[in-house]
Amino acid sequence: MSDFVLQHRLAFTANLLRRLSDRIVDECDVWLAGQGFTAPGRTASTLMLLLERGPTPITEIAAGIGFSHPFVVRLVESLEALKFVDSRQDPRDGRRRLVGLTPVGVLEAERIQRTRDAVGAALAEVLEEAGVDLLADIETVNRALDRRSLDRRLAELTEEGEP
């Protein structure tokens, strides 16, 4: 059976990007598990951010890793369940929670930090083999969307009578 999404490439660009992202994360998870890691790969940037910055409010974690507040709340809850982080009320602002690494979380974050170069080198090899500068292209697309969002472009197209 043919891949429906691939038949309609541009309309489902986000789906294709998600597939690629999931594949990268899943394949890194396999390697990381083989190295003795227990934290899911999707949490690596959060663990490293907390190692670098110390206890951090969820809003600042979200800004730092570029994900939504609700996504980061779920991510932190999963890390709490694994005992890698704990959270407490910010003594300076009772409305905010500060998230910090537990001793086990520090060890895991330090181990992830030591693998960063290997993961980067492997991904650089893939991108070179594919002949793409994916990171630069992603930044270029993001800048174009910053200049004029996709929803605005869609609204303009439909105003012009194109479905």
Image (spheres, rainbow, N blue to C red):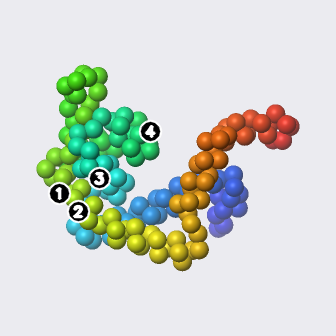
The earlier-in-sequence mark between 3 and 4 is 3
Which residue has dot 2 on it?
Answer: 111
Q: Earlier in the sequence, mark 1 or mark 3?
A: 3
Residue drawn at x 53%, y 75% is: 128
Inspect this view and state whether residue 109 appears. Answer: yes
Along the polypeptide, which appears first: circle 3 or circle 2?
A: 3
> Which residue type does callout 2 highlight?
Arg
Local SS, label 3: helix
Considering every residue shown, the one lying at the far right of the view is 161
Residue that extends furthest to the left in the rendered view of this protein? 103
Distance from label 3 to label 4 (Cα)? 18 Å
Q: Secondary structure under badge 1?
A: helix
> Which circle's residue, 2 or 4, is located before the other in the chain?
4
Q: Quadrant of the C terminus?
A: top right
The amino acid on which the numbered mark 4 sits, given as a three-letter code, is Ser
Which numbered disc covers residue 148?
Answer: none
Residue at image x 30%, y 34%? 57
Residue matched to label 3: 48
Residue 107: image tag: 1
Residue 80 x/y as whole percent: 23, 43
Circle 2 sits in a helix, a strand or a loop, which is it?
A: helix
Pointer 4: what residue?
A: 68
Q: What residue type is disc 3 on?
A: Met
Q: CA distance from mark 4 to mark 1?
A: 26 Å
